[in-house]
Structure formats: structure tokens, C-alpha cells
Image (cartoon, rainbow, N blue to C red):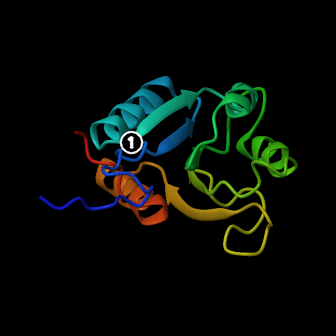
Amino acid sequence: MSRMASPGGGASSKPKARKWVLVVDDNARLRALWIEVLEEAGYRAIGSEDGLAAGDLIRDLFPDLILLDLRMPRASGWDFLENVRANPRWHTIPVVIVSAHLEEGPDLAGDSGLNIVGQLAKPVSVSDLLAKVEEIIGPAQARV
């Protein structure tokens, strides 16, 4: 019986951790739906109701992707993005804006320096949301 080396150098390799998605939206029902759909697709997901709460979450979590609404109480999506981008540890996290107000703020297609990698106009279908997530960060790890 031959032994094949794993990429890590051992005889067997561990499955990679599932990818994290941070969902920032003040609509609780929508946020819960997206988290459920993402988790069913194999991603790990956590939600926040606004930019301030998301700022607290991101301190302990380094997500692979942020799905971000623009209009929220206490701190808007733009406020959250500016705070994230000010921290060198977080400024490379890709962001997809998911909002009914895509016309607000900097030109999303332009060079805003905010690492906005996509946008989806609300209402967005679950299939479009999952397709965008997979396009940006790839498929979630398969469950074992």
C-alpha cells in the first residue's frame, strides 16, 4: 500500500475550514434568510443589524466576504466601510453591496478604494445571491 503525501506534508489532509460570510443588513427577516441560505450552501455566516454592530463582530472574525446594505440605523454601510478600510488588517476583505439604493455614495464601478467587488440590487433572488458569493470567494467546502 503506497502512502501519498498531503499538501501539508502528512499522510492525510484535513478538510479546509468553511468560508465565512458577514451579512450586514437592518432587515432581520432578510438577514436571517440569507444566513440560512448561505449555511445550507456550506458557508459559515453571521449577521449584524448595522454598521456599528458589524464593527464589533469584525474584530473577532475575519470574514472571506461581506454582504453589505447601505441604509441602516446608527451607522450606514458607507460608515462601516470607511472604518473597515482604515484598519490595515481588514482593508482587503471583499465587499458586495446589496441594496435598493445603489445610486448612493461613491461610484461603485469607479475606484473608490473600498474593495467593492460587486453589487446586487434589492430585491435579490437567493440564486443570484449565492451565485455572486461563489463568483467572489468560490464554493464553500463540502460537508464531510
From what the image shows, is residue 113 above or below residue 121?
A: below
Residue drawn at 62 percent across, 52 percent down = 101
Q: Residue at x 28, y 37 (%)?
A: 40
User: What residue appears at the point 56 percent right and 39 percent down from the top-left corner?
Assistant: 22
In this figure, what is the number of numbered marks? Answer: 1
What residue is at 77 percent from the left and 41 percent from the top? 80
The extreme bottom residue here reads 110
**Residue positioned most to the right:** 86
Q: Which quadrant would the N terminus be assigned to in this image?
A: bottom left
Q: Quadrant of the C terminus?
A: top left
**Label 1 crowd (10 A; few <14 / some 14-19 / many >=20):** many
Q: Is residue 122 left or right of residue 83?
A: left
Q: Is residue 34 left or right of residue 68?
A: left
- Name the residue beneath numbered marker 1: 43
- Residue 99, given in percent of the width and then of the height, sits at 56, 49
Amino acid at circle 1: Tyr
Q: In the image, residue 58 lies at what x, y percent?
A: 69, 34
Please determine whether, in this image, residue 131 is positioned above or below residue 52: below
Q: Residue furthest front?
A: 1
Residue 46 placed where, x, y %?
51, 30
Above or below for 56 versus 125: above
